[in-house]
Image (cartoon, rainbow, N blue to C red):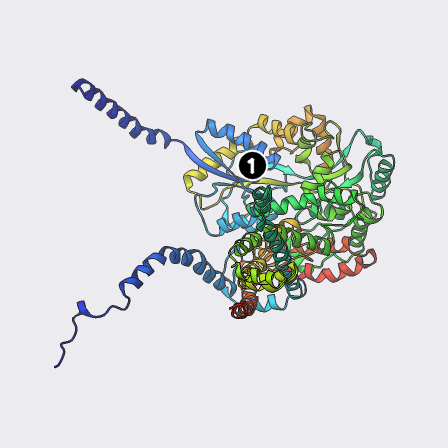
Amino acid sequence: MSKFKSSRLLAGLGLAAGLAALAPGAASAATDLTICYMNHPVQTANLAILEKWAKKQDVNLTKTPMSYSIYLPKITQMLANNSTGQCDIIWHNDDWGQDWAQYLVSTDDVPEIKNVAEGQLEPFFNEKGQPTTVPMATTAGIFFYRTDLVSEAEVPKTWDDLVKVSQKLQKDGKVKWGYVGGMTFTNTFFSFWWSLWNNNCDVYAPAYERDNAVLSKNGWKPMTADACQVQTAEFWWDALHKNNISPPGMSTYSRDEANAIFQAGDAAFTVADSTLLGTYNDPKKSKAAGHVGMARFPQGPMSKEHRSWIDIWGWSIPKSVTPEKQKAAKALLGAMMTDYEGQIAQWEQTGGPPPNSKVWAMLDKTDPVWRQVKGILFDSAHVHDAYYFRNWAVVHKTYSDILIKAVTGAREDIPKVLTEGAPAIQQGAMR
Amino acid sequence: MSMAPASAAHRPRLLGEKERFMLLLIAPAALVLLSFEVVPILIGMNASFRDWSLVNPQKTWVGLRHYVEVFTDPVFLKIVLPNTFILMVSSVTLSLVFGLALAHLLKRQFFGRILIQTVVLLPLTIAPVITATMMRWSFNDQFGVLTTLLAYIGVPQVGWLSERWPSFIIVILTDVWIWTPWFTIILLAALQGLPKEPYEAAQIDAASKWGIFTHVTLPLLRPVIAVCVLIRAIDAFRTFDQVWVLTGGGPARSTEVFSVYAYVEAFVNLDLGRGAAAAGAGAIIMLAVGLGLYAIVNRAMEVSR
């Protein structure tokens, strides 16, 4: 090798070494954040907003999807052990607010967090009364119907209407089933609970109360054996076995099976999160696309008023995350909260009400579908879709088992099954 | 003549060179076993004696409270344990019978044998959770391939996944489908290694095919069958994936087995203490069952010698 070539090689190596030495310095300016979430349309849509802002804020955002079935134990274990390096931002659900609050940083300094609708952050309050999440969307169940089969005037207003309209559509050969919805644990909302809450009923008395002190003072009295609960169970038993408006196997359905049937065009009605509107209206995924309307829940015989749940899904930051990453995470979530256009796009894509109520005012002026959804969900009486005591998960599972036993057994045994199940519901809260 | 005390250098070692070399060879495996089996079991046992919620782990010592709760839980005694043993006995028996039949078939030379052998072994290559998901959709009452086929051939409508026994039968058949190839492989290897002399003697005695099978083949296979049954029975006791994916233990806990019970306590109810106690209770029961099966296996070995 000539001397000239050797010196060029050395110079080249020196340059490469210099660049390599500079590279980590350049990369270290960016902050790495890992976000753990569930692969759901509204979470995916909100992640798109976060990714957009991550690029602008020089954040490397790594997405870690997790199955719903393992999400709660996995993240709970991570939080309780103060693990670091796994998830810097986590998806949070109001059902787990009471369990995780102690492990999450306060989000009261995130821009525009004060614009979240009143009451929606309550389940996420820590002991100081500060929120521990930044909402991505309201997740509220809504009654979907097929506009090509049922006019707005014909939409069922009561359970009886639901049966009559369903049977007529089935008899006319227009649809295979009237109603389909998830029923297994944890899909209780899409069958048992919307009907329970719209029959002047609840899991514990007094109905719709979520203050643990009040519930405790009342002895955690379950409403499991009350007439309103028996009526609810009988309605579903009849839907499955007597009126045949729902598939007989519905007691084994999660939201996946129910969605598959509705999207296949085999059912006229369903209840699901409003965030699925975009999926139902996607012609690539749904035969019902373009014919999906939304309405209030049909009311039970003991109902006094329409009642919806309007709880939120959010993003939270574990306390175990380093202060630098906490700051970067809050900046990212704040950018999402102030990205009005992004939130409108998310609403249009999924049907998930935007987290910032300022955006609601903008949509009020421009979007008739929004006005309809807002009227159904927000101009209504409300109930939180969970209770907020430590063993709520145990009670939810117990309740689901009791109701499924009731609707898959003999109809005349329903009061007995519910009465026998009541002590377990009461003990669950006191466990 | 008196002997001077042996110096440290010449003192006989506790372990010879051969033993030390053997220990060195098994050390990596022992280390893995210790780290990922023994230590977690000890941690789990420790948790079972404590009030150890996954949410707020206080880890207060509660003694045998969790074990008492598990052993007095009517669901555990009246549903979980019977289901677990029904699944274990029926799955092992059916898998053994089908595995033996397939092994016999594949022992013969015929066109396409290798292809059929490969196809037969496929279920073993699929993760149980995928198999169970496939079965769940196959038995869906609206879209299921199998429910449609059964309806087509005139089988009356059954709540395959919404009633206790039909759904439990599906769980058992799924387990059989997964594990039959395992029996097939091992029994086929055993069949191919059997000595020819007893068969020649049986043919000279003009024994029937069934007679040869029952009086020659089965006795010769007994040690292999016994070991297979022992291993598979212990494995079947801890079946989780198929039950969780297919039925989730439902409807209303009626198809719950031991592993699902422990999982629900630990990871749905987030009560690690009680979940660990449920697992410990299962281990105690399985130890007793395992010892019984081991005695049977030993007996089978002795008889076959």
Q: Residue at x 44, y 32 (%)?
A: A60
Look at the picture and state if B256 lies above or below A93.
Answer: below
Q: Chain of mark 1?
A: A
Q: Is residue A260 above or below residue A186?
A: above
What amino acid is at disc 1?
Ile
Name, please, the residue furthest toward the bottom.
B1
User: How many numbered marks, from 0 up?
Assistant: 1
Q: Which residue is mark 1?
A: A113
Q: Residues within 10 Å of mark 1 (few under 14, many from 20)?
A: many
- Dot 1: element: helix
From the viewer's perspective, is B164 left or right of A121? Answer: right
Is residue B176 rendered to the left or right of residue B227?
Answer: right
Please provide percent x and percent y for residue B272.
54, 58
Residue plotted at (74% across, 46% down): A250
Which is more toward the observer, B289 or B40? B289
Q: Is residue A275 above or below residue A228?
A: above
State the residue at coordinates (43%, 59%).
B39
Q: Quadrant of residue A182?
A: top right
The spot of residue A124 in percent (x, y) is: 57, 45
Residue A248 appears at what percent x and percent y?
78, 47
